[in-house]
Image (cartoon, rainbow, N blue to C red):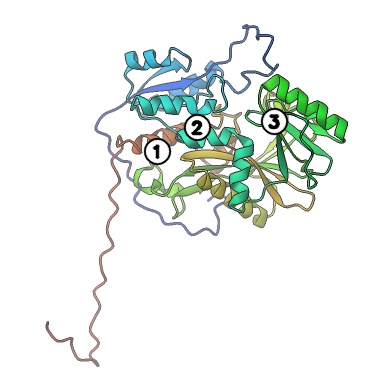
C-alpha cells in the first residue's frame, strides 16, 4: 500500500473491467511545438511553451492502443472541425492548449460539445476558469480555500492594495507552464513592480496577477476521479469511498535550479535529473499532517471548480508554513517520466498505460460509451429469533 493512502477508509468494490460493446477510434488532440518556426515579433519569447512534443502524443497513442483501440493524431488548429468530420472518432483524448484568446483551453471542449463528440477531461466552463488564475483565486477565496493576498492589474497604474507587502510576485493572469515567470517575477519595491507589471501587460496582452511572495516549499498534488468513479473505473480499488484518488504529494525543490527559488519556464524546460533542473521529490518528505492537508485541499480545489476526472493543483507554503493554493491545471502534462502528474502516478504504483487508459475510460463513461459496473446489492441478514422472546405475529 502506498504510504499516502495508509489509514484511509476505503471500500474495495468489484474489480471486473466494464465490458465494451466494441473498441473505439480515438483521436488524440493537441498543439505541437514547432522547433524551427520563428516567432512573430509581437509575441513573448516563451509563446507556445505549453504545447506538446510529438513524442508525447506517440506515448499517449501507444498507451491507448494497448487496450485494443485504434488511434490517430489531429493537430488542434483551425482545420480541426474539418479533420474531425473526416476522421469520425468515437472519442477524443484532449490535451490541446488552444490557439490564443482569454479562454483558449476551453476552445476544443466547446467545439467538441458543439459537434457532439465525446472527449476526456474537464468541460468548457472549468477549462475557461482554470486558465484565468485571478478568477480561480476569487472562487477559491469565496469558498474559504487558502490563497495569498492578490491583485489583478489591467492598466498598470492601479494603486497597490494595502494588504500587499513586498516582496511580491508578478505573472501573467492567463498563462500556464510557467510562462512569464523567471527570476525577475519577484519584485521588491514599487519601481520594480511597475516595470514588471507593464512588461507582462505589454508582452502577454493580458492583465498581470500580483500576489504576496510565498517563501516556503512548493508542492503539487494530482487528483483522479469524480463521485461515480467506482461505476466506470478500470481500477475501482484505487479510489476512496468518495470516488476520488489523491495522488502522492510531489515537492518541487527549485533551490538548485537555473532559477533558484522560482519554478518558472526555464526550470520546467530542464529534463528531470539534468543540471539546473529542480529536484522532484515524490512522495514529498513531509509530515503526515501536511500531506493530508495538501491532498484534501487539492480535492477541494478540484471539486469547487467542477473539474472532471483529472487535475493537478499547485501549492506553496507561506512564511508560517501554511499551504496556499497557487493554481490548478485541468489539462496536466502527460509526458512519461517528466510531467508532474506522471511522476506522482508512478509513485502511487500506477503505470503510464493505466493512467492514460483511466483518463480515457472516465471521459468515455460520461457519454455512455462505458456501461456502469454492476455492484451487488447487500442482502439483508437473516436474524435468528431469540428463544426467550415470542415470535412476531403473522401480519
Query: Which residue carries the number 1 mark?
Result: 362
In the displayed structure, does residue 244 sit left or right of residue 285? left
Whether residue 179 can be seen here? yes
Q: Is residue 190 above or below residue 112?
A: below
Whether residue 263 can be seen here? no
Query: Which residue carries the number 2 mark?
Result: 352
Label 3: which secondary element: loop
- Report which quarter residue 74 is drawn in: top left
Measuring from the top left, give residue 180's x and y in whole percent: 71, 25
Q: CA distance from mark 3 to mark 1?
A: 39 Å
- Report which quarter residue 216 is drawn in: top right
In the displayed structure, does residue 304 sit left or right of residue 249? left
Label 2: which secondary element: helix
| First of labels 2, 1 by sequence position | 2
Q: Residues within 10 Å of mark 2 (few under 14, many from 20)?
A: many
Q: Mark number for residue 154? A: 3
Amino acid at each position: 500500500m502506498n504510504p499516502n493512502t495508509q489509514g484511509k477508509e476505503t471500500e474495495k468494490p468489484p474489480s471486473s473491467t466494464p465490458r465494451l460493446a466494441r473498441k473505439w477510434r480515438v483521436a488524440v488532440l493537441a498543439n505541437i511545438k514547432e522547433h524551427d518556426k520563428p516567432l512573430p515579433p509581437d509575441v513573448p519569447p516563451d509563446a507556445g511553451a505549453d504545447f506538446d512534443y510529438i513524442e508525447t502524443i506517440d506515448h499517449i497513442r501507444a498507451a491507448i492502443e494497448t487496450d485494443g483501440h485504434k488511434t490517430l493524431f489531429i493537430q488542434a488548429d483551425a482545420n480541426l472541425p474539418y479533420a474531425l468530420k473526416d476522421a469520425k472518432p468515437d472519442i477524443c483524448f484532449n490535451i490541446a492548449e488552444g490557439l490564443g484568446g482569454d479562454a483558449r483551453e476551453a476552445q476544443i471542449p466547446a467545439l467538441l460539445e458543439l459537434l457532439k463528440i465525446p472527449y476526456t477531461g474537464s468541460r468548457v466552463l472549468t477549462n475557461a476558469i482554470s486558465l484565468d488564475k485571478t478568477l480561480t483565486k476569487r472562487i477559491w477565496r469565496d469558498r474559504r480555500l487558502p490563497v495569498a493576498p492578490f491583485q489583478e492589474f489591467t492598466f498598470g497604474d492601479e494603486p497597490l492594495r494595502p494588504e500587499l507587502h513586498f516582496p511580491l510576485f508578478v505573472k501573467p493572469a492567463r498563462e500556464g507552464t510557467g510562462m512569464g515567470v523567471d527570476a525577475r517575477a519577484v519584485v521588491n519595491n514599487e519601481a520594480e513592480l511597475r516595470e514588471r507589471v507593464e512588461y507582462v501587460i505589454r508582452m502577454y496582452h493580458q492583465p498581470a496577477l500580483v500576489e504576496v511572495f510565498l517563501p516556503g516549499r512548493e508542492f503539487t498534488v494530482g487528483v483522479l476521479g469524480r463521485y461515480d468513479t467506482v461505476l466506470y473505473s478500470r481500477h475501482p480499488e484505487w479510489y476512496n469511498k468518495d470516488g476520488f484518488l489523491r495522488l502522492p504529494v510531489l515537492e518541487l525543490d527549485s533551490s538548485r535550479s537555473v532559477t533558484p527559488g522560482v519554478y518558472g519556464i526555464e526550470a520546467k524546460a530542464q529534463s528531470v535529473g539534468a543540471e539546473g533542473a529542480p529536484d522532484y521529490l515524490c512522495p514529498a518528505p513531509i509530515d503526515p499532517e501536511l500531506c493530508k492537508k495538501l491532498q484534501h485541499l487539492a480535492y477541494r480545489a478540484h471539486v469547487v471548480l467542477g473539474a472532471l476526472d483529472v487535475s493537478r493543483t499547485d501549492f506553496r507554503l507561506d512564511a508560517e508554513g501554511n499551504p496556499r493554493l497557487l493554481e490548478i491545471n485541468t489539462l496536466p502534462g502527460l509526458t512519461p517520466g517528466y510531467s508532474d502528474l506522471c511522476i506522482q502516478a508512478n509513485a502511487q504504483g500506477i503505470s503510464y498505460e493505466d493512467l492514460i487508459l483511466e483518463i480515457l475510460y472516465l471521459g468515455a463513461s460520461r457519454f455512455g460509451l462505458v456501461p456502469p459496473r454492476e455492484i451487488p446489492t447487500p442482502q439483508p441478514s437473516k436474524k435468528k429469533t431469540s428463544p426467550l422472546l415470542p415470535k412476531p405475529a403473522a401480519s
